[in-house]
Amino acid sequence: MMRLPAIPLAARLPIVSAAILGLVGLVASQAVMGALVEMQNRHLRETLTARIDALALALGPAVLREDVWETFDILDRASGAGGRLPTLRSTVADRTGTVIASSHPDTDPVGAQLAPAIDAAVPVADLSVSGKAAAVSVAAPLLYQGQQVGILVSRVDLSALLAERRATRATLLAGNAVAILLLGGIGYALIRRGLRPVAVLSTHLSGMGDDPQPVPERAFPRDRELARLFFTYNRMVDAVRDRAETDRRIAERERYVSLGRLSSSLAHEINNPLGGLMNAVDTLRHYKDRPDVAGPAIDLLDRGLRHLRDVTRAALQTHRGDHAAAPLSAADFEDLRMLIEPEIGRRAQRLDWRLGEIPEERGGLPAGPVRQIALNLLLNASEGAGAGGVVCFAAREEAGALRLCVCDTGPGLPASAVARLLSDVPPVNGGGFGLRLVRDLTTGLGGAIDHARRDGRTEIRIVLPLREEA
Amino acid sequence: MDRPRQSARRKLLRGFLGVAAGLAAPAIVRAEGPTFRFGLTPVFLNTDAELLARLRGWLEGTLGRSVRFVQRRTYREITNLALVGDLDAAWICGYPWLANRAALALVAVPLWRGRPLYRSYLIERAGGAAEDLSDLRGTTHAFSDPDSNSGFLVTVSDIISLGHEPEGYFSRTFFTYGHRNVVRAVGSGLAQSGSVDGYVWEALAATEPDLPAATRIVARSEWMGHPPVVCPRAREGTSEITALRRALLSMSDDPDGRAALGLLQLDGFVPGRENLFDPIARRMALLDRAE
């Protein structure tokens, strides 16, 4: 079905009002026309009854004597009179239907048979102005001293009544049209004026880049209720801005929180080999002349220092801004593994790590947000799995999307955490901002999040569509 | 029909003004003697109120007494009123005068176009092609009055002269009781033919030209004595009749009289002689023989 173009509210209301007005006008006009028709019919019957009665009174003796001239003279003088209902022709016949005289002898000559005209005529009581017939023939018996002496057939001109009807109809139509146009126009102007504050609100609401803008106080309407609405709107804009700023700060903080959480593990990770490295240094100091002892010590020192370098690099890349926009690669996931393993080890957990085909520098996905998503989910899974639990991670490219799956054997996410992950409900004070950050980053990359609990595991799946590079 | 009606209305209005003037002026003279009763028949355009007002104004001024015009629908009624003495004088047709010549005396005869004569017209509707009376046989015919010479006697006697019975010669006849009405009846088509006073037909041509224009003259009769003013023989020679005759004969000398004559489209009155009416008498004799 073809959809009509949307009509602005300022025009729609006047159009609806005009349509209702037109409908009411139409009904009222019909009622007026009905009353006019009824009045005209009554007027027609009353006038013709009176006229025929008067004619019968004058014609009676002449018709009784079958006086051709006197009958003609009376009819002739009566014809043409009648104001808005002029008599076009009147003919008098005797009781057998033979014409005595007519005001128009050419049409009804003396002595002719009037029966066909009598049959075609309408009794006055049944008379009505209908259709477009501009004239009507009426028949009435001529009574004299209580006896019927003849019959009168009159043809009456109805054109004045029809013209009056047409004029009334035209006046009603014109009046309705003027009223509809006038009131519709006034309605449009009033509604447009009334909706002006709404337009101001709409403009500021859509604002620059969908960022709601406050309405300056000088633009507030004078109407108190509307002014209160503007005031409330401005407060809402402030609240939205505050919330956006808060969210930004929380996200920033969350990055450092996750870093902080990692730092103890990292310290442990650095501290553990440090003892071995110090021993290797002592060994080298004491047995620098014995290559059989110094060689393994040097190898141990080399491995330890490399490990420390890798750990440090992974931590730096996770939190360094200039790496955030770099394309994602498999190395990023290896860095993540290196970062999370100390935390896994600390909790005596088992990490099930499945890395599928990750095309190097493909898909246009930035490394920073994806690493942050995976790291937050892994940290959350490690915390949820508890001591001795299992944390699993899978990443692969499939059907033009990068699919991440993080699961744990913990008791599952509380409902508030699920809400933060899957919806836009505001975060409750006290934490859980990591999951909200996951949601915000995923949404920002045009991805989708799915949460499931099956076989005693909590699964969170992230699907990030790959963007083909030019 | 509208123009004659409007014209009639204007004349009626003028007539009312004239009547008002006439009533105001002779208020004193009217008290000097008994009212003079003057009978009028439709031998002339008796529907014109202005004419009647003028005529009365002149007559009252001349006779020095109030005048009452008595009008009836038929010639017969006026003739009868004159015969029983309820009228001092009457303007009637030559036919009823001749029929009652023993009781009614001639006072004066009008002059029309310089002669005390007029004639009857046989008319049909304009556009007709009848050449004479025989072409009108079987039509609906309008007569003026059964006691009218030009509006009845002439045509009936002509039918007899043609060797036909008057009854049934026309398919249907009716009387209109007025020469103007005959013209109306024929002009409107109510009747296909009619018998009318030639003087009235010609006078109408000047005052209401549409009426005679709707008709056509088929035949004209011979000249006959114009409808005369008569009085009961018992009043012949009385001072009021003498005054009336003198007034009529000098009517053209008086400004008011001339104005009235102008409306009547007559030239004046002459004493007249009985032989003026011989053609009518001959037609009467023809009718009597047929009966």
Image (cartoon, coloured by chain):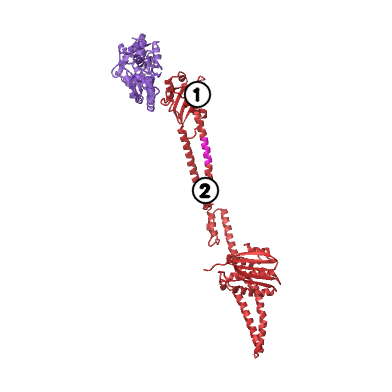
Looking at the picture, how far across and down is residue A6, in whole percent? 52, 53
The single residue placed furthest to the bottom in the displayed view is A289
Rendered position, B39 above or below A258: above
Quarter of the view holding residue B278? top left
Residue A141: which numbered mark, if any? Answer: 1
Q: Colour of chain B?
A: purple
**A18 vs A309: above or below:** above
Q: Nearer the viewer, residue A56 or B254?
A: A56
SS for dot 2: helix
Judge whether residue A29 is colored magenta: yes
User: Which color is chain A depicted in?
Assistant: red
Pointer 2 residue: A15
Where residue B72 sits: x, y (%)? 41, 17
Q: Give, as a three-letter code, the residue at label 2.
A: Ile
Span colored in magenta:
A26-36
Q: Position of residue A386 (x, y in %)?
A: 70, 70
What is the chain identity of the residue bearing mark 1?
Answer: A
The residue nearer to you, when weighing A258 against B26, is A258
Of residue A371 and residue A231, the one placed in the foreground of this image is A371
Left or right, residue A458 beside residue B189 = right
